[in-house]
């Protein structure tokens, strides 16, 4: 069966992915030895569209009725261009230099190389194939299990109940303990120091806050600019302060929105309290604590808080 269709705007074809899966997934390899491929489809996953990556779902149906599904993650600048985060010219310059996107994709590749199959206590998707971006971000690819088949994520600002937040905290605590007890075995320390967090869009986000709440935050925001643009200060916050405070460093996810946490679906198709996967480890970095993680969890109740404030202003309470 010929499957030379190119996947999205990537350099990968369906055939090339099939060859990868035959080599890397023993279950798939054994199945195709006993039954021919009937149909292959690739679907762009709108729910997994990120700022610097996108996902296609690959579905393979065999003649005997067996179906295999995989998530194909590619680094990309298309979202930034479409949403006008930067001008077309600026994005193209970034793409030509191949630094930011390659770095971020390769950090995620490095994370999965270190922790997949290492009895890691934090749930992550099963990864079948990793291709770092060596000279161009367009070379990058991660092939993993499609968690959306059995799980679901919440929307970015959707409310998480207290029980789910405690589940998240428990997994993070177990992961940090695992890191501290396995530094020699896994040798993760010193390998995630390149991520520049907070990211370069923070100034634009603060500017947006001025338009949402005009006349309320201008002076505060103006005072923050020197701080958020001081990279040496960021470096101290993230790493150097650990030595001064005598606190051990751990790995932080760096992008822990509700959209990056998969929960198993129950019989009604709703999210249970079983967490089956933390995804998108592309902003992983070393820090002394998960303070940034908690900030992201808290962001999930931001809209609810804003609604409550508006009700207070309007005299409903």
Image (tube, helix red, strand yellow):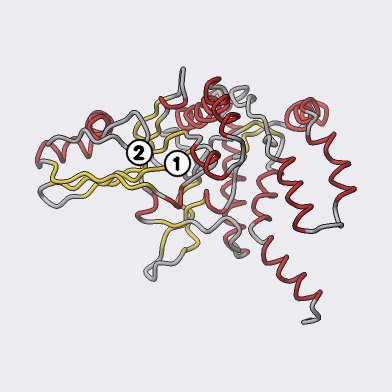
| Pointer 1 local density, CA inside 10 Å: few below 14, some 14–19, many at least 20 | many
Question: Could you tell me which secondary element the residue under label 1 belongs to?
Answer: strand
The mark nearer the N terminus, 2 or 1, is: 2
**Residue 84 % position (x, y):** 59, 42
Question: Could you tell me which secondary element the residue under label 2 belongs to?
Answer: loop
Q: Is residue 93 above or below residue 149?
A: above
Give yes or no for contact between labels 2 and 1 (Cβ–Cβ under 8 Å). yes
Q: Of residues 258 and 186, which is closer to you in this image?
A: 258
Q: Is residue 147 above or below residue 98?
A: below
The residue sitting at 54% across, 35% down in the picture is: 282
Is residue 261 among what the camera can see?
yes
Location of residue 125 by image quarter: top left
Q: Which marked residue is nearer to the observer: mark 2 or mark 1?
A: 2
**Location of the N terminus (image quadrant):** top left
The residue sitting at 59% across, 51% down in the picture is: 170
The residue sitting at 14% across, 42% down in the picture is: 37
Q: Point out the residue furthest to the bottom here.
A: 316
Q: How many marks?
A: 2
* Residue pointed to by mark 1: 54
**Location of the C terminus (image quadrant):** bottom right
Q: Is residue 41 above or below residue 248?
A: below
Q: Is residue 258 left or right of residue 38?
A: right
Location of residue 3 by image quarter: top left
**Residue 16 % position (x, y):** 26, 29
**Residue 99 % position (x, y):** 56, 22
Q: Of residues 95 and 116, which is closer to you in this image?
A: 95
Q: Is residue 301 left or right of residue 262?
A: right
Of the numbered discs in the image, which one, if any, rests on residue 202?
none
Is residue 176 among what the camera can see?
no
Q: Point out the residue furthest to the top here.
A: 135
Of the numbered discs in the image, which one, if any, rests on residue 8?
2
**Residue 262 % position (x, y):** 47, 53
């Amino acid at each position: 069966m010929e499957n030379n269709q190119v996947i999205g705007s990537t350099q990968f074809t369906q055939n090339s992915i099939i060859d990868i899966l035959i080599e890397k997934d023993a279950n798939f390899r054994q199945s195709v030895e006993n039954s021919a491929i009937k149909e292959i489809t690739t679907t762009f996953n709108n729910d997994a569209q990120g700022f610097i990556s996108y996902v296609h779902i690959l579905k393979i149906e065999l003649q005997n009725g067996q179906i295999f599904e995989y998530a194909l993650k590619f680094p990309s600048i298309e979202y930034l261009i479409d949403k006008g985060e930067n001008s077309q010219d600026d994005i193209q310059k970034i793409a030509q230099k191949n630094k930011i996107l390659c770095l971020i994709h390769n950090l995620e590749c490095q994370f999965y190389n270190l922790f997949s199959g290492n009895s890691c206590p934090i749930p992550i998707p099963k990864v079948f194939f990793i291709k770092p971006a060596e000279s161009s971000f367009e070379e990058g690819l991660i092939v993993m299990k499609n968690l959306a088949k059995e799980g679901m994520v919440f929307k970015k600002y959707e409310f998480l109940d207290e029980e789910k937040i405690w589940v998240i905290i428990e997994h993070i605590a177990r992961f940090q303990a695992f890191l501290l007890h396995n530094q020699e075995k896994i040798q993760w320390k010193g390998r995630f120091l390149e991520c520049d967090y907070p990211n370069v869009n923070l100034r634009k986000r603060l500017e947006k806050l001025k338009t949402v709440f005009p006349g309320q935050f201008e002076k505060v925001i103006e005072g923050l600019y020197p701080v958020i643009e001081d990279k040496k200060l960021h470096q101290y916050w993230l790493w150097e302060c650990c030595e001064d405070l005598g606190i051990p460093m751990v790995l932080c996810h760096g992008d822990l929105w509700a959209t990056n946490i998969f929960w198993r679906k129950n019989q009604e198709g709703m999210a249970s309290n079983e967490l089956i996967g933390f995804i998108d480890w592309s902003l992983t970095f070393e820090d002394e604590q998960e303070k940034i993680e908690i900030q992201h969890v808290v962001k999930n109740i931001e809209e609810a808080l804003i609604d409550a404030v508006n009700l207070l202003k309007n005299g409903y309470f």
